């Protein structure tokens, strides 16, 4: 199938829906775990739930890293459709699992498909929009993640103890999107141009650490790791950190909603500003602001209005800072390497999504979560800032993007 310049709206909508499904699914397990433990379904214990949650994220990381090179070889369209299909089928099977072990394996397999969804969707969006809108392509697409998370939360409130509905809903949603993707999703013009030149099989994954790309790869991997550590660490433990600081439970839970509202606002602002003044510059400002705001949250704030404003601003900067890394990767790497580069950047970031909640949870267990939790997050944001300071303009990569997307 050839790329069509007349369908940018369909491309944007389908990529956004793909990321929405990921946001939906990654929150679905968290919403289901309390019910699984309460009912002791299949003999679920806290240890079993931890195993399932960890394998889910490992599957996502493996899927992101492993399917990236296939995207560069066989095309964006087929890999995006295939990844949604894999995720949907195995998600529908999860409620039928006969024991915790099979439940965990099915979550891992679903994660393989899910892991490819976001980097491939971001690649498709970047390559089907003008180069001048590269940052916007990434940040606007990622708003789908937070919309998916909100939808899961609302469905969980309705489903209550019927946790199976969450997984059936995710699997069915994915299957419903597939026919539309088959019909309306074009192949990337950048991929087709690279294929015509015979470049689709020339890039090996190991080249990301070769002389030409080593500095950029290490910098974006570090930034992605630190960025997702912050995103998942805060989303998992912010209410408990606030409770430890002495804030009421209702306030602590509300602040999590405020944080994610800030995330959506930040994604819209960051993409627009980055396309005007440059992704690197905005990423540096965003991570620097994140470090300052996270450190400031370690202070006891008696004013409810000021506290909500601080948390809102933290969400504005923290969540979109990490997404800007994806925008930079999409612009810096040529078409024949873009899927591999985005896949590995996402995969390394997923490791941060595992480490963040683990370290913060250890702090909570040790009774030092406040104020050390916020100081830890501030230090992580500072390390991410150091990483993006190493980024440089890669003129060859940017010319490749501009030549196929303008």
Image (cartoon, rainbow, N blue to C red):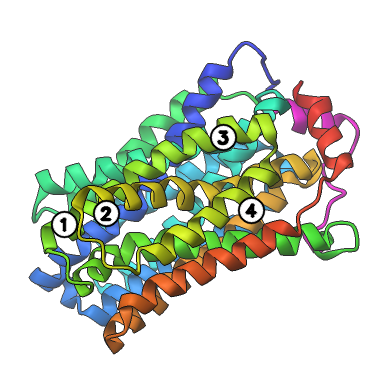
What's the CA distance linking mark 3 and mark 2? Answer: 26 Å
Q: Distance between the residues labelled 4 and 2?
A: 37 Å
Query: Mark 4 or mark 2: which comes first in sequence?
Result: 2
Q: Name the residue under label 3.
A: 271
Q: How many residues crowd mark 1 within 10 Å: few (<14), some (14–19), many (20+)?
A: some
- Dot in front, 4 or 3: 3
Start and end of the magenta stretch?
188-206
Which residue does the image show at 51% across and 20% down from the upper left? 10
Element at badge 1?
A: helix
User: Tags 4 and 3 in contact by the CB under 8 Å rule?
Assistant: no
Label located before the other in sequence (4 or 3)? 3
Q: Nearer the viewer, mark 3 or mark 1?
A: 1
Which residue position is annotated with label 1? 251
Q: Residues within 10 Å of mark 4 (few under 14, many from 20)?
A: many
**Residue 58: mark:** none
Q: How far apart are marks 4 and 1 (CA)?
A: 37 Å
Q: Indicate which disc residue 343 carries.
A: 4
Q: Label for residue 307? A: 2
Q: Which of 398 and 268 is in front in this view?
A: 268
In this rendered view, identify the residue nearer to me: 10 or 147: 147
Q: Of discs 4 and 1, which sits in the foreground?
A: 1
Residue at screen point 20% across, 79% down: 45
Q: What element carries label 2?
A: helix
């Amino acid at each position: 199938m050839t790329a069509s310049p007349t369908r940018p709206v369909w491309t944007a909508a389908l990529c956004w829906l793909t990321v929405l499904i990921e946001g939906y699914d990654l929150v679905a397990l968290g919403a289901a775990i309390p019910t699984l433990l309460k009912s002791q379904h299949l003999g679920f214990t806290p240890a079993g739930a931890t195993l399932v949650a960890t394998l889910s994220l490992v599957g996502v990381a493996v899927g992101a890293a492993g399917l990236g090179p296939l995207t560069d070889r066989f095309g964006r369209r087929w890999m995006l459709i295939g990844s949604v299909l894999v995720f949907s089928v195995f998600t529908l099977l999860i409620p039928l699992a006969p024991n915790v072990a099979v439940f965990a394996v099915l979550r891992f397999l679903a994660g393989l498909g899910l892991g490819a969804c976001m980097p491939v969707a971001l690649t498709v969006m970047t390559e089907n929009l003008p180069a001048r809108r590269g940052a916007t392509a990434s940040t606007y697409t990622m708003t789908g993640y937070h919309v998916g998370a909100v939808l899961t939360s609302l469905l969980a409130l309705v489903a209550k103890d019927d946790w199976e509905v969450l997984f059936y809903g995710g699997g069915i949603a994915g299957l419903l999107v597939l026919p539309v993707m088959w019909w309306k999703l074009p192949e990337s013009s950048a991929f087709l141009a690279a294929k015509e030149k015979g470049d689709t099989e020339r890039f090996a994954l190991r080249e990301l650490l070769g002389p030409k790309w080593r500095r950029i790869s290490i910098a974006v991997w570090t930034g992605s790791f630190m960025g997702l550590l912050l995103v998942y660490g805060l989303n998992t433990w912010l209410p408990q950190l606030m409770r430890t600081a002495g804030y009421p439970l209702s306030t602590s839970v509300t602040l999590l909603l405020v944080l994610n509202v800030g995330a959506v606002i930040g994604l819209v602002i960051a993409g627009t500003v980055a396309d005007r003044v440059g992704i690197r510059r905005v990423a540096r400002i965003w991570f620097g602001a994140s470090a300052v705001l996270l450190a400031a949250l370690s202070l006891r704030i008696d004013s409810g209005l000021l506290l909500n404003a601080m948390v809102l601003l933290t969400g504005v900067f923290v969540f979109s800072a990490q997404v800007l890394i994806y925008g930079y990767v999409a612009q810096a790497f040529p078409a024949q390497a873009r899927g591999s580069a985005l896949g590995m950047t996402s995969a390394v970031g997923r490791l941060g999504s595992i480490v963040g909640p683990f370290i913060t949870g250890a702090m909570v267990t040790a009774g030092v979560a406040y104020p050390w939790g916020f100081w830890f997050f501030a230090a992580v944001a500072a390390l991410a800032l150091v990483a993006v300071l190493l980024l440089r303009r890669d003129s060859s990569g940017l010319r490749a993007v501009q030549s196929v997307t303008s």
